[in-house]
Amino acid sequence: MQTKTLKIGTRGSALALAQARETRDLLIKAHGFHEDDIEITVISTSGDRIQDRPLAEVGGKGLFTLEIEEQLADGRIDLAVHSSKDMPTFLPDGLHLSIFLEREDPRDAFIGRDVRSLMDLPQEAVVGSASLRRQALIRRARPDLKVVNFRGNVETRLRKVADGQVDATFLAYAGLKRLGLGHVAMELMDVRSFPPAPGQGAITVETRIGDDRVDTLLAPLNHLPTATALACERAFLAALDGSCRTPIAGLATISGDTVKFHGMILLPDGSEAHEVFSEGASLRAAEIGREAALRVRELAGPHFFNDWH
């Protein structure tokens, strides 16, 4: 039977392409497709083109998805492969996150030029990060350090560290592993004291609502424990109106029929943080995330959120 070509849309970074190829290979394995049946289309996004300013100043997470979602909505591509942590909590009308692939290690990795851990950095060392969450967590652990905005893909940031532009940086360990660079991680941060971004380590696939052909092809790739964990984390984020202007961390883990969630919100300077721990039935994952957000909002008080903007 002649199969209709599937077109996968993705950003053009090495990591984005690795994620798209991982999705393509799983589709080939699940359905016996030939490699020629699936085309990977590289789409340039505003987030990739704007490198000189923090994302929060120019529109936030959606800058990594806007152009891809436009092509998905009008049918130029059939599915879009994303890093889950890049996805805004509210998607354009007519689009949804169809599946989640099995999550990689969600921890952050420390990469230093002359030292092997965050606590070993000398006083007033310079650490580069574009993530407000990481910036706040770094300042919380080491208020003496100088934290600077640090954009670019994985390879660019590693080169900047090697060249001495900064003394250290943090990257998602999952991304390093997917690029075959897991060995450059010098310290893997404990998720209790340095919790990851909601969705970190998980690949998601976005499709058009009602495109049953594509969603049916993708269904065997869905990893239910990851999808359940992400439902909890994304509900936490959505209830806090999470964006690139808000330092929010959250990690849900699944054990049998139970979901355990740890969420944290911080002031950008790391001077104040509030965290919440929740546990419940996996079937209530999204509800548990929303309830955790309400609890942590109550703990922090209204002034806390005023200081975010």
Image (cartoon, rainbow, N blue to C red):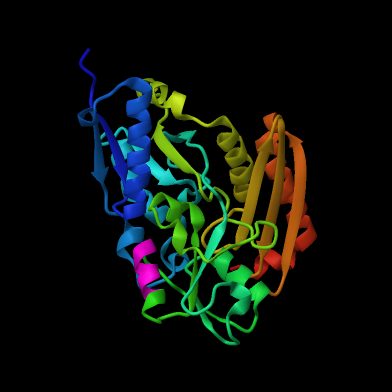
- Above or below: residue 148 compared with residue 192: below
- Above or below: residue 13 compared with residue 120: above
The residue that appears at 38% across and 49% down in the rendered structure is: 65
Q: Position of residue 17 (x, y in %)?
A: 32, 47
Q: Nearer the viewer, residue 270 or 246?
A: 270
Find the residue positioned furthest to the bottom. Answer: 123
Determine if residue 147 is in view.
Answer: yes
Image quarter where the C terminus lies is bottom right
- Residue 108 in which image quadrant: bottom right
How many numbered circles are shown? 0
- Above or below: residue 252 compared with residue 132: above
Determine if residue 268 is in view.
Answer: no
Image quarter where the N terminus lies is top left
Tell me, yes or no, whether the highlighted magenta stretch contains residue 103. no
Find the residue positioned furthest to the right. Answer: 299
Q: Is residue 202 left or right of residue 27?
A: right
Q: Main secondary structure of the magenta part?
A: helix
Q: Nearer the viewer, residue 283 or 109?
A: 109
Q: Is residue 230 left or right of residue 42?
A: right
Q: Position of residue 25 (x, y in %)?
A: 34, 33
Find the residue positioned furthest to the front. Answer: 183
Q: Position of residue 171 (x, y in %)?
A: 48, 62
Q: Nearer the viewer, residue 184 or 290?
A: 184
The residue that appears at 56% across and 37% down in the rendered structure is: 226
Q: Is residue 24 left or right of residue 189?
A: left
The residue that appears at 32% across and 58% down in the rendered structure is: 46
Q: Nearer the viewer, residue 173 or 257?
A: 173
- Above or below: residue 156 compared with residue 212: below
- Residue 255 in which image quadrant: top right
- Write down the region rendered in magenta: 154-160
